[in-house]
Image: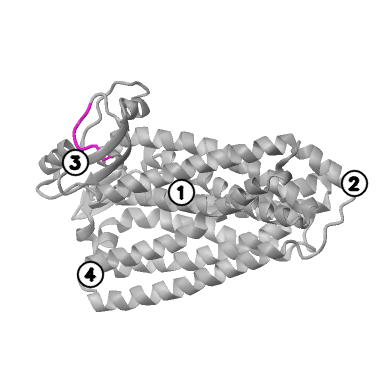
Amino acid sequence: MDELMLARWQFGITSTYHFLFVPLTLGLSILVAVMETVYVRTGNELYKKMAQFWGKLFLINFALGVVTGLVQEFEFGMNWSEYSRFMGDIFGAPLALEALTAFYLESTFIGLWIFGWQRLSKGLHSAAIWIVALASNLSAFWILVANSFMQSPVGYVVRNGRAEMNDFTALLTNPYVLMQFPHTILAGLVTAGVFVMAISAYHLLRRSQREFFRPSFKIGLICALTASLLVAGTGHRQAQFLAEAQPMKLAAIEALWETADPAPFTLFAAVDATKQENRGEVSVPGGLSLLVYNSPNGEVKGIKDLQQEGEKRFGSGSYVPDVPTVFWSFRVMVAAGLWLLAITALCAYYWRRGTLEDKPLVLKAAVATLAVPYIANSTGWYVAEAGRQPWIVFGLQRVEQAVSPTVSAASIWITLVGFTLVYGVLAVIGVYLLGKFAKQGPVEPIEATASTVGKGVALWN
């Protein structure tokens, strides 16, 4: 492999490792803050134990997210120096603000939260974890501001071969980030809700510490079910926006080779990118037009026409992403989302009937569902990034123009293997620690009085 392909593999691997931990950090920080708030409002020690237990798992995940994300900062300058030269004026601003307004805030208040249980008042200690949750999600906002410029550039001019910012407000109000940010936050809440559900279901199956894991399961269930419904809605709005901002990505998602009106929604197909055709296609007539325009009629441009438009606008070359992988990644994401909706709705049904703990198969399904939001997150992010190809900055810079010209393939090979091994070890350690403490449950037994339990139950009912 040449330098370009190696650099892409390295960034892809490090990004995938990092993004395994990001959604859980975003969502679980909020859930831990909610649990501690319930404790402050009710005085129920059970919810203090919940904040401490789930907070411990949050801290492990948070630490791994920080460690795996640091390397990416260096890769921009080392493997992608031409990208950094071209985009540094714009890309550097939100990254700097992410460090100044979010990361430092997280680092400070997470320390206060860890060591302040006996030193701060209940209200101040609860405020500390809320600030951590706010900073974590603010961090995501700044990263998505930078990424959204790569997806849909706004507020810039090109001078002397460089993109320079001329409207910071336009950067912050980029329609792409306004679509992407709520979708990402909600995906984090789905991940956190399922995480809490799955671990709680594991203990309910074993009939261990049920007075602790029953309310934990309910909190996770409410979060996962609500966020799953909302994330589907924000995903739908993103798809509609793509029809304007990145029609090629939308066409690749559907493997739509020819412009159609009405356009079908393809369920399954054997996509042949070489012949630019689909075999064995199963589709819903007018389904794609309905999704894009809220009407069964409406033209959606196909890949072939969009390729011709790209050549007229940008010159000769291929402007078609890897259609088969984008097509199937999207369907895996959708299938994962449908499963999350189904299992959370089923659990909610049996919970309301008071028979969930008598349904071991449902509880086992909830435990197995732990992997599903991670699959949805990874495939969804792949669609967002791979569907933009061959652009690293849409319409401004191609991927092959962004790679460093002086870094050798041997150097990238060495760091690629090194980072992959180190990250692999970290992932194993992280999964081991999360599994160990999740199976162990709260260290001290919960002995809540009837009155304090009643306060907590009343609040959640």
Neighbourhood count class around disc 4 (C-alpha, 10 Å): few under 14, some 14–19, many 20 upward: many
Residue 365: % across, % down: 59, 49
In this rendering, would 318 be left or right of 335?
left
Q: Amino acid at mark 4?
A: Glu
In this rendering, would 71 be left or right of 190?
left
Neighbourhood count class around disc 3 (C-alpha, 10 Å): few under 14, some 14–19, many 20 upward: some
Name the residue carrying label 1. 376
Sequence-wise first label, 1 or 3: 3
Name the residue carrying label 3. 277
Q: CA distance from mark 3 to mark 2?
A: 66 Å
Sequence-wise first label, 1 or 2: 1
Q: Which residues are magenta?
A: 255-260
Q: Amino acid at mark 1?
A: Ala
In this rendering, would 82 be left or right of 447?
left
Name the residue carrying label 2. 450
In front of the other: label 1 or label 4? 1
In front of the other: label 3 or label 2? 3
Q: CA distance from mark 2 to mark 4?
A: 65 Å
The reply to whether residue 405 is in sight is yes
Secondary structure beneath disc 1? helix
Q: Quadrant of residue 356?
A: top right
Q: In the image, is residue 235 above or below residue 374?
A: above
Residue 289: % across, % down: 31, 26
Residue 258 magenta-drawn?
yes
In this rendering, would 185 be left or right of 28?
left
Name the residue carrying label 4. 3
Sequence-wise first label, 3 or 2: 3
Asked if labels 2 and 3 touch by Cβ distance under 8 angstroms, the answer is no
